[in-house]
Image: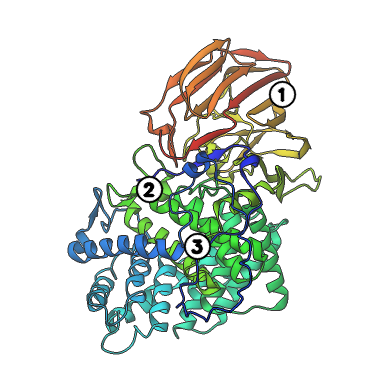
Amino acid sequence: MQKPKLVSSAIAGAVLLAACGGGGDGGTFFPTPVAANPPAPAPAPPAEAPVDPEVLAAQPKLSNTPMDEIVRNNLLPTIERLFQQVRTQKLDTELLGVKVFASNSGDKFLPGKVAIGFSYLLLNASPSDPKYKEYLDGYREIAAMTTGVTNESWGIYYYVSALWKLKKAGLLDGPDAAVDSATLATLRTKLDWRTFVNEADYSLIGLPTNYYGVAFSVARLRYLLGWEGPEASEALLQKMINHYKTFSAFGFSDETDGSGRFDRYSILLIGEIMQRLIETGMTVSAQDEASLKGWLRQSVDVIKLRLNPAGNGVDFGRSLAGYADTAFAEVLSAAEHMNVLSAEEKDIAYAFATRVTAKYVEFWYDSETGSLNMWDKGRRTDSYRGKARILGENLSLSHQLIYTNNLWKSAGYAQKAPVSTQTFLAYLDKLPRSTLTKFAGFDGQAATYDRGLVTYRDGLRVISLPVVNGAQTYHRTNPYFAIPHSYNMLSGVADTQWPQLQPKFTVATSSDPLIPASYQKNLQIAEAGKVLTVSYTQDAMDKATGGAPVKDTRITSATTYTFEPGRITRVDTYTPAAALDIAKVELEFGTYSSGATATGTNKFSFATGDVQGFEVEGLQNCAPVDVSADTNYNTPNGAFKTSIRCDSPAFNFASPLTVKWVLKYRSPSVASIAPR
């Protein structure tokens, strides 16, 4: 299995502004008579400069293959193998040790994902295909078999989406219907948005705000299937649009009602909304369309800053792994369809979507086990996407890639090879070095805090600094910390609270730790040449207990980051409101690098890996620890090898404390996203 990589290199000399690559149209060649005095042949276009071998090694092998070819040759065959397994093993189906249909499996969406995933076998086969009747009979059997299996929210959406696709293809009617009449009657009752939405006011029942999109989609598809009127879908769409207008000052979805949690879904949700409008043919008012397209364009602008040769997506927050990459593919295909991209952007977006698809095949899909891998060989997801969902995740990720591919096909890219690697790299070379994307706040009001995403590009390496607040229970987990994230160099670990790259204070009179995680203000950036400075203050610490953040004003702080090629520096100054007895201060640096050697007091170098050095000032007792066998140090993309752990013993905190760390990384370098 090819292990795609991400280059972190300023390779401007190897990147020329060359013409687009791509395949021919495959049409029939008709010879024409040769003229008596044929004109001189046109000069050949200038040859593109050879691509740096490190860049070629960094991108998936299939990066320059038409996306549809990858889908047909790789994704559909894997779906067929799973289909045959489920048809044979039925409710006893076991995948890599997981009884996927077990009542305690924890997968609440599985029947819907089975329905949508397996529908593609029917939708991509001809009735003359020898396997067609096998697909039809098997689909009917599986649909009837799974009616009693738990299927909630997202699962409901996936199922009604599958039924609508089958209906449009003429596969829900007549003696050869893919779902028998008794099963369809049962599904009509069960597949209802009212199971997770209050019908009286269309409010969600204990779910984050992205579920407004799920509810709207279910209601709209039920209407198209003839199961209800249009009122609910129209009301739910307005509910979702109003949420954006109320809590998304800069056009990005707050996952809460104003608490300020921004993550993958904040960028993705508008893409999903537009995808559902496209899927169901729903039109909105001119005013709403302008708002939706404006928000979509803003998500595109964030994604553009993060494009890379390896097909890597979001790198902070929850629910990442393969979904980090497909989020970008979903937004970009919707943007193409809604004509918010320029002609050049469309070609680049398609080239990146192809890389996402290729990365799925070569990295996320494990040919040794015959399954998607987001849980083993050093990889880890949050509990929401635990291995109990292995079958559903195989099918839903394939679904996302297939339906986005269908949009590219409808746009004329069916057999089109992406632009050449040289052209793709030349586009990346024109992107800004650093940007601050605002999510919320920035109004100078005492009661509000700044939420945003800083992006710094060092060559082809993308470094994120999310200042986003996890809210609810996520504020205390390190994927939401205001620390740098970058594929295969800097990462959080799902559902863990160890103090990655930011201090944790334990007060002597309390067991509740205090962390600088939720109360950022005055977020600013300043760029000078290749150096980016980021600064913000906090008027309180976050008491990292269960539930939502708890404000603790006994300590305030000021933070400054400096990003420059090959080096990141963070300096914090913590100031007590009054003398305070501190039991200890802790800080860690978990890294993919290994072979740590002390080069001075709290200074370390690494023998292997992209991070070459790490040093700390203001804390004591720093030492390296081998964490390669500890699952609490497994990231979405692979296992950390080393943790540098620092702590300071008890002291009376009466004057400002400055904590500084410096991280040096390989630049230029090749950064493998495969587990080391």
Mark 1 lies on a secondary structure that is strand
Residue type beneath disc 2:
Gly
Q: Tell me the residue at 55%/77% (across/down).
A: 232
Mark 3 lies on a secondary structure that is loop
> Which residue carries the number 1 mark?
573
Looking at the image, tell me whether mark 2 or mark 3 is earlier in sequence order.
2
Residue 465 visible in the shown view: no
Q: Nearer the viewer, residue 166 or 248?
A: 166
Looking at the image, tell me whether mark 1 or mark 3 is earlier in sequence order.
3
> Which residue carries the number 3 mark?
417
Mark 2 lies on a secondary structure that is loop
Q: Tell me the residue at 35%/28% (across/down).
A: 629
Q: Tell me the residue at 52%/81% (across/down).
A: 33
In this rendering, the answer to whether 208 lies above or below 601 is: below
In this rendering, the answer to whether 582 lies above or below 352 is: above
Looking at the image, tell me whether mark 2 or mark 1 is earlier in sequence order.
2
Q: Residue furthest bottom?
A: 174
> Which residue carries the number 2 mark?
386
Residue type beneath disc 1:
Thr
Residue type beneath disc 3:
Ala
Residue 115 x %, y % = 34, 69
The residues bearing labels 1 and 3 have C-alpha atoms spaced at a distance of: 52 Å
In this rendering, the answer to whether 94 lies above or below 552 is: below
Label 2: how many Cα within 10 Å (few below 14, some 14–19, many 20+): some
Relative to 109, 252 lies left or right: right
Residue 345 x %, y % = 64, 61
Q: Is the residue under label 3 in contact with that under label 1 (CB below 8 Å)?
A: no
Q: Quadrant of residue 145?
A: bottom left
Q: Is the residue under label 1 in contact with that under label 2 (CB below 8 Å)?
A: no
Residue 498 visible in the shown view: yes
Q: In which quarter of the image is residue 338?
A: bottom right
Residue 410 x %, y % = 52, 74
